[in-house]
Amino acid sequence: MYGSLGLTDFGLTTADLNTINTSLVNLGYSSSTTDNAGVSIKLHAGFDLSDFFAVEGGYTNLGDLVLYTTTTGPVESITIVIGIDGFELTGLGKFGDDDMYFFARGGFFTWTADALVTGTRGSSTAVLGSGTEPLFGGGVDVNGIRTEALAYMINGEYLYNYTIGYKYSF
């Protein structure tokens, strides 16, 4: 069993954020800001096929991309939360011994992205997309404490996820 917390970089540059915020202001919103990182959660299980190879899979929530915007007429504060979660199945190549090993990971992530728009008049949810795409990365495990960096492909763009977690073996 393996669980971790991490941070997802949605890959938006300062120029991207400025473009999004400027576009919203040009539509008539008085201001706009964007939070470009989300807290991720992973709950996985796996099986060692050998001393050098394992298969792991489970639920992954990459966190939320949040946009805050306000209007002047009528005065309104609007929050848009875009979340991505799904299930992944990966192979793990391990290099080292049981107490400490480095690993490379590759596999597939089946994901769904949705948006929640909330204002004073209520909220609305919509599915933005879904798919099954590759992921890859690597990390190190020291006595069950695991740190890793992963790249998830979502609609042709990479999201980068950095986690620390604990692996319990039985």
Image: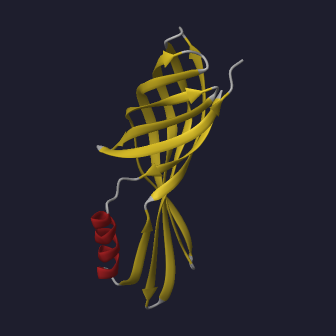
Q: Looking at the picture, tell me which residue is in the foreground, 47 or 14.
A: 14
Q: Position of residue 24 (x, y in %)?
A: 34, 76
Which residue reaches farthest right?
170
In the image, taking residue 154 as reference, residue 118 lies left or right, namely: right
Colour treatment of the image:
secondary structure
Which residue reaches farthest top?
50
Question: Residue at coordinates 46% horizontally, 24% vertically from top-left?
Answer: 103
Q: Give the answer, above or below, for where 15 lies relative to 94.
A: below
Q: Looking at the picture, tell me which residue is in the foreground, 99 or 147.
A: 99
Q: How many marks?
A: 0
Question: Residue at coordinates 52% horizontally, 65% vertically from top-left?
Answer: 124
Residue 15: quadrant of the picture: bottom left
Q: Position of residue 128 (x, y in %)?
A: 41, 53
Q: Looking at the picture, tell me which residue is in the foreground, 115 or 133.
A: 133
Q: Give the answer, above or below, for where 103 lies relative to 7.
A: above
Quadrant for the C terminus, please: top right
Q: Position of residue 165 (x, y in %)?
A: 61, 37
Question: Residue at coordinates 51% horizontally, 44% vertically from top-left?
Answer: 85
Quadrant for the N terminus, please: top right
Q: Position of residue 144 (x, y in %)?
A: 64, 27
